[in-house]
Image (cartoon, rainbow, N blue to C red):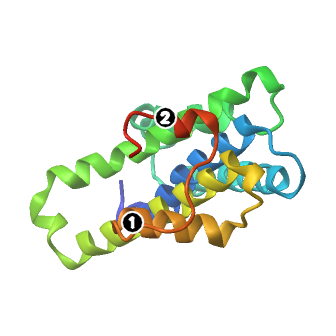
Protein backbone atom coordinates (compact mmCIF):
# COMPACT_ATOMS: atom_id res chain seq x y z
CA UNK A 1 0.00 0.00 0.00
CA UNK A 2 1.12 3.52 -0.67
CA UNK A 3 1.18 6.38 1.85
CA UNK A 4 -2.21 7.66 0.71
CA UNK A 5 -3.87 4.27 1.27
CA UNK A 6 -2.25 3.93 4.70
CA UNK A 7 -3.54 7.38 5.73
CA UNK A 8 -7.07 6.46 4.63
CA UNK A 9 -6.90 3.10 6.41
CA UNK A 10 -5.88 4.86 9.63
CA UNK A 11 -8.65 7.45 9.25
CA UNK A 12 -11.28 4.76 8.73
CA UNK A 13 -10.08 2.37 11.46
CA UNK A 14 -11.99 3.83 14.43
CA UNK A 15 -15.25 4.54 12.57
CA UNK A 16 -15.22 0.99 11.19
CA UNK A 17 -14.65 -0.49 14.65
CA UNK A 18 -17.63 1.52 15.88
CA UNK A 19 -19.73 0.34 12.92
CA UNK A 20 -18.76 -3.28 13.65
CA UNK A 21 -19.60 -2.87 17.35
CA UNK A 22 -23.00 -1.36 16.48
CA UNK A 23 -23.88 -4.72 14.96
CA UNK A 24 -24.41 -6.13 18.48
CA UNK A 25 -27.30 -3.86 19.51
CA UNK A 26 -28.72 -4.07 15.99
CA UNK A 27 -28.93 -7.86 16.05
CA UNK A 28 -30.21 -7.87 19.64
CA UNK A 29 -32.98 -5.42 18.86
CA UNK A 30 -33.99 -7.33 15.73
CA UNK A 31 -34.06 -10.63 17.59
CA UNK A 32 -36.19 -9.25 20.44
CA UNK A 33 -38.78 -8.02 17.88
CA UNK A 34 -39.81 -4.99 19.96
CA UNK A 35 -41.74 -3.18 17.20
CA UNK A 36 -42.26 0.56 17.05
CA UNK A 37 -39.46 3.07 17.45
CA UNK A 38 -36.89 0.57 18.68
CA UNK A 39 -37.33 -1.53 15.57
CA UNK A 40 -36.94 1.60 13.43
CA UNK A 41 -33.69 2.33 15.27
CA UNK A 42 -32.49 -1.19 14.45
CA UNK A 43 -33.31 -0.72 10.76
CA UNK A 44 -31.45 2.60 10.68
CA UNK A 45 -28.45 1.07 12.50
CA UNK A 46 -28.42 -1.86 10.09
CA UNK A 47 -28.38 0.40 7.05
CA UNK A 48 -25.87 2.80 8.62
CA UNK A 49 -23.37 0.07 9.48
CA UNK A 50 -23.67 -1.57 6.07
CA UNK A 51 -23.25 1.77 4.29
CA UNK A 52 -20.17 2.46 6.44
CA UNK A 53 -18.64 -0.83 5.29
CA UNK A 54 -19.56 -0.07 1.68
CA UNK A 55 -18.02 3.41 1.86
CA UNK A 56 -14.83 2.00 3.37
CA UNK A 57 -14.58 -0.62 0.62
CA UNK A 58 -15.10 1.95 -2.12
CA UNK A 59 -12.56 4.36 -0.61
CA UNK A 60 -9.92 1.68 -0.14
CA UNK A 61 -10.40 0.34 -3.68
CA UNK A 62 -10.09 3.90 -4.92
CA UNK A 63 -6.85 4.76 -3.06
CA UNK A 64 -4.84 1.52 -3.25
CA UNK A 65 -2.46 1.16 -6.19
CA UNK A 66 -3.31 -2.52 -6.85
CA UNK A 67 -7.00 -3.30 -6.26
CA UNK A 68 -6.77 -7.06 -6.83
CA UNK A 69 -3.88 -7.43 -4.39
CA UNK A 70 -5.84 -5.47 -1.78
CA UNK A 71 -8.96 -7.62 -2.30
CA UNK A 72 -6.86 -10.79 -1.91
CA UNK A 73 -5.41 -9.47 1.38
CA UNK A 74 -8.80 -8.18 2.68
CA UNK A 75 -11.46 -10.68 1.59
CA UNK A 76 -13.54 -10.11 4.74
CA UNK A 77 -14.17 -6.49 3.75
CA UNK A 78 -15.60 -7.60 0.41
CA UNK A 79 -17.60 -10.48 1.94
CA UNK A 80 -19.21 -8.14 4.48
CA UNK A 81 -20.41 -5.73 1.80
CA UNK A 82 -21.56 -8.41 -0.64
CA UNK A 83 -23.24 -10.82 1.78
CA UNK A 84 -24.74 -8.54 4.47
CA UNK A 85 -26.82 -5.86 2.70
CA UNK A 86 -30.01 -4.94 4.56
CA UNK A 87 -32.12 -5.81 1.51
CA UNK A 88 -31.56 -9.54 1.99
CA UNK A 89 -34.58 -11.68 2.89
CA UNK A 90 -35.27 -12.13 6.60
CA UNK A 91 -33.79 -15.63 6.61
CA UNK A 92 -30.41 -14.34 5.44
CA UNK A 93 -30.29 -11.28 7.72
CA UNK A 94 -28.38 -13.30 10.31
CA UNK A 95 -25.34 -13.01 8.04
CA UNK A 96 -24.84 -9.45 9.32
CA UNK A 97 -23.10 -11.08 12.29
CA UNK A 98 -20.14 -11.35 9.89
CA UNK A 99 -19.64 -7.62 10.50
CA UNK A 100 -18.53 -8.48 14.03
CA UNK A 101 -15.46 -10.20 12.62
CA UNK A 102 -14.03 -6.76 12.03
CA UNK A 103 -13.71 -6.43 15.81
CA UNK A 104 -10.88 -8.98 15.60
CA UNK A 105 -8.68 -5.98 14.89
CA UNK A 106 -9.10 -5.09 18.56
CA UNK A 107 -7.52 -8.37 19.60
CA UNK A 108 -4.43 -7.47 17.62
CA UNK A 109 -4.36 -4.23 19.60
CA UNK A 110 -4.60 -6.16 22.86
CA UNK A 111 -1.54 -8.20 21.92
CA UNK A 112 0.49 -5.05 21.53
CA UNK A 113 0.71 -4.17 25.21
CA UNK A 114 3.01 -1.25 24.59
CA UNK A 115 0.30 0.45 22.61
CA UNK A 116 -2.46 -0.52 25.03
CA UNK A 117 -0.81 1.45 27.81
CA UNK A 118 -0.28 4.48 25.60
CA UNK A 119 -2.63 7.41 25.04
CA UNK A 120 -4.02 5.65 21.96
CA UNK A 121 -4.65 2.50 24.01
CA UNK A 122 -6.50 4.60 26.56
CA UNK A 123 -8.67 5.99 23.76
CA UNK A 124 -9.54 2.46 22.62
CA UNK A 125 -10.35 1.45 26.19
CA UNK A 126 -12.58 4.48 26.57
CA UNK A 127 -14.26 3.68 23.26
CA UNK A 128 -14.85 0.05 24.27
CA UNK A 129 -16.22 1.13 27.65
CA UNK A 130 -18.57 3.61 26.02
CA UNK A 131 -19.74 1.00 23.50
CA UNK A 132 -20.28 -1.51 26.29
CA UNK A 133 -22.35 0.93 28.34
CA UNK A 134 -24.47 2.11 25.41
CA UNK A 135 -24.77 -1.35 23.84
CA UNK A 136 -25.47 -3.10 27.13
CA UNK A 137 -28.00 -0.48 28.14
CA UNK A 138 -29.75 -0.70 24.78
CA UNK A 139 -29.87 -4.49 25.00
CA UNK A 140 -31.25 -4.31 28.52
CA UNK A 141 -34.03 -1.94 27.45
CA UNK A 142 -34.77 -4.10 24.38
CA UNK A 143 -35.14 -7.27 26.42
CA UNK A 144 -36.92 -5.60 29.35
CA UNK A 145 -39.46 -3.78 27.20
CA UNK A 146 -42.24 -4.65 29.66
CA UNK A 147 -40.68 -2.24 32.19
CA UNK A 148 -41.23 0.72 29.82
CA UNK A 149 -37.69 2.02 30.25
CA UNK A 150 -36.10 4.50 27.89
CA UNK A 151 -32.58 4.28 26.49
CA UNK A 152 -31.17 6.57 29.18
CA UNK A 153 -32.53 4.23 31.87
CA UNK A 154 -30.72 1.37 30.14
CA UNK A 155 -27.48 3.35 29.96
CA UNK A 156 -27.85 4.27 33.64
CA UNK A 157 -28.40 0.58 34.49
CA UNK A 158 -25.34 -0.49 32.45
CA UNK A 159 -23.09 2.18 33.96
CA UNK A 160 -24.13 1.44 37.54
CA UNK A 161 -23.80 -2.29 36.96
CA UNK A 162 -20.32 -1.94 35.44
CA UNK A 163 -19.13 0.22 38.31
CA UNK A 164 -20.74 -2.06 40.93
CA UNK A 165 -22.73 0.85 42.36
CA UNK A 166 -26.01 -0.91 41.75
CA UNK A 167 -29.30 0.72 40.91
CA UNK A 168 -33.00 0.45 41.49
CA UNK A 169 -33.43 -0.93 37.96
CA UNK A 170 -33.01 -4.68 37.59
CA UNK A 171 -34.16 -7.48 35.29
CA UNK A 172 -37.73 -8.60 35.88
CA UNK A 173 -38.16 -11.21 33.16
CA UNK A 174 -38.72 -14.73 34.54
CA UNK A 175 -35.46 -16.06 33.06
CA UNK A 176 -33.45 -13.31 34.75
CA UNK A 177 -35.17 -13.77 38.13
CA UNK A 178 -34.36 -17.48 38.23
CA UNK A 179 -30.72 -16.95 37.34
CA UNK A 180 -28.33 -18.68 39.77
CA UNK A 181 -26.07 -15.61 39.72
CA UNK A 182 -28.74 -13.26 40.99
CA UNK A 183 -28.87 -12.87 44.73
The tag earlier along the polypeptide, 1 or 2, is 2
Q: Is residue 109 above or below residue 86?
A: below
Residue 76: mark = 2
Q: Is residue 176 above or below residue 138?
A: above
Total labels: the figure holds 2
Tags 1 and 2 in contact by the CB under 8 Å rule?
Answer: no
What secondary structure is found at the residue carrying circle 2?
helix
Residue 176: mark = none
Whether residue 11 is visible to the viewer of this picture, yes or no, is: no
Q: Residue furthest bottom?
A: 119
What secondary structure is found at the residue carrying circle 1?
helix
Q: Is residue 116 above or below residue 62?
A: below
> x%, y% of residue 24?
56, 46
Residue 129: mark = 1
Q: Nearer the viewer, mark 1 or mark 2?
A: 1
Q: Dot 1, crowdedness within 10 Å: few (<14), some or many (≥20)?
A: some
Residue 145 horizontal side relative to residue 16, left or right:
right
Residue 15 horizontal side relative to residue 43, left or right:
left
Residue sitting at 39 percent across and 66 percent down? 129
Amino acid sequence: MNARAIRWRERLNTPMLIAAALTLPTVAIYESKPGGTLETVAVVLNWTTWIAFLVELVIMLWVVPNRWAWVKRHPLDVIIVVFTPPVLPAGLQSLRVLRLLRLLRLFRLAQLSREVFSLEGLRYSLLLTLLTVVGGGSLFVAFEHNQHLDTWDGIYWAATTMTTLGSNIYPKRPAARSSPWRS
